[in-house]
Image (tube, rainbow, N blue to C red):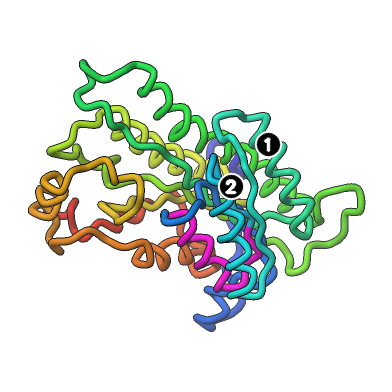
Amino acid sequence: MADMKDGKFVHDATTPPTSNSVFDLFSLKGKTAIVTGASAGNIGLGVAQALAEAGANVAIWYNKRKEPAEQAAAEIEKEYGVKCRAYQVDVTSYDTVAAAVDANVREFNGRLDIFVANSGIAWTGGPMLDGPVDMYSAVVKTNVDGTYFCARAAGQHFRRQKREGTTFGDDARPLDPPFTSGSFIATASMSGHIVNVPQLQASYNASKAAIIHLCRSLAVEWAGFARANSVSPGYIVTSISEFCSEDTKRAWKDKIPMGREGHVNELKGAYLYLASDASSYTTGTDIKVDGGYCAP
C-alpha cells in the first residue's frame, strides 16, 4: 500500500537520483527485467533488446513460439553481453505467473527492478453483437487479467526489496546496486483512448483502457516502492495486425497525421525512459506513441 497517514501521503517517501548525468540516469547496469510477450517480430522483443542494450539482465516470456524466443534470447546475450533467458509462461494463470516471477528472480541475481507486461491478443471478431463470446473472454483474460497478475507478482518483490533491501531466497544478501524503486510498465494502446475505425473491436479497446487505469491506480498504491506507468502504441508494424487488409491499413494512414504505421524501434525510447531512473518522478502516466493519431 502507499505510504499514507490520516488520509495524506507521507512526505519525502521517495528520493531523487543522486546523479545528474543523463547516461547514468538511463543506465540499467546490474538491474533485472522481465518482459512478457517477447517473441520474434513484436514490441516485447524490441523492448527486451532496448533494456539489454542499457545494461539490464532480461528474462523474456513467450506463449507458444519456443524456438524463436530462445534464439532471440541467445542473440541478446551475444549482442549486449548480459544474461538473457526465454521462458514459456501462461500469463492468464496467477499461480503460474507468481511461480515464474519467483523462479526468474532467484536465477537473475535475486532481484527484480523492471517488469514490462506486454502480452496481449487482438480482437478479430468484428462487431460486438456478432463476435464470439469466447474470443471476448480470451482478450480479457490475456490483456486485463494477465496484466493484473503480472503486476501483483512483480509488486510483491518490489515491496519486499524496498522494505528489506536484500536479495530473494534463503541466502539473502544486500542488493548491489541498492534497490531504489521498482518500475512496472504495461503495454496499453491508443485504443484505450479512442475508438478505432474502420475495424470494430470493442473488447480490445475496453481491455486497453482498463490497463491504463490499472497503472494509474497502482501508481497511488505503490508510491514509495515502485512506479507504475503504461505506453500506448498506435498502429505499429507487428504480427498482431497481420489480420487486417491493405484497404484497412490505408484507412488507418488517412487518420494518422504522420501518414504511416510506426516501427518497433520507435517505441524503445519510451519504455527505456520508464524503466530507468530518468523517470524517477514519473508515475501514473501513459505515454502515447501513435504518430499523432489521438491529437486531433
Q: Give the range drawn in magenta.
A: 43-58
Q: Which of 264 and 145 is in front in this view?
A: 264
What residue is disc 1 on? 98
Tag 2–tag 1 contact (CB < 8 Å): no
Q: In which quarter of the image is residue 210?
A: top left
The spot of residue 120 in percent (x, y) is 43, 40
Is 134 rendered above or below residue 262? Answer: above
For the point 54% across and 75% down, the residue is 25
Q: Which residue lies furthest to the right in this view?
A: 171
Pointer 2 residue:
66
Helix, strand or loop status at disc 2: helix
| Amino acid on which the number 1 mark rests in the picture | Ala
Please name the amino acid that badge 2 sits on.
Answer: Lys
- Depth order, front residue of 250/232: 250
Residue count near mark 1 (Cα–Cα under 10 Å), binned few <14, some 14–19, many ≥20: some
Residue 244 image position (x, y, % from top left): 22, 42
Looking at the magenta stretch, what is its main secondary structure? helix
Q: Earlier in the sequence, mark 2 or mark 1?
A: 2
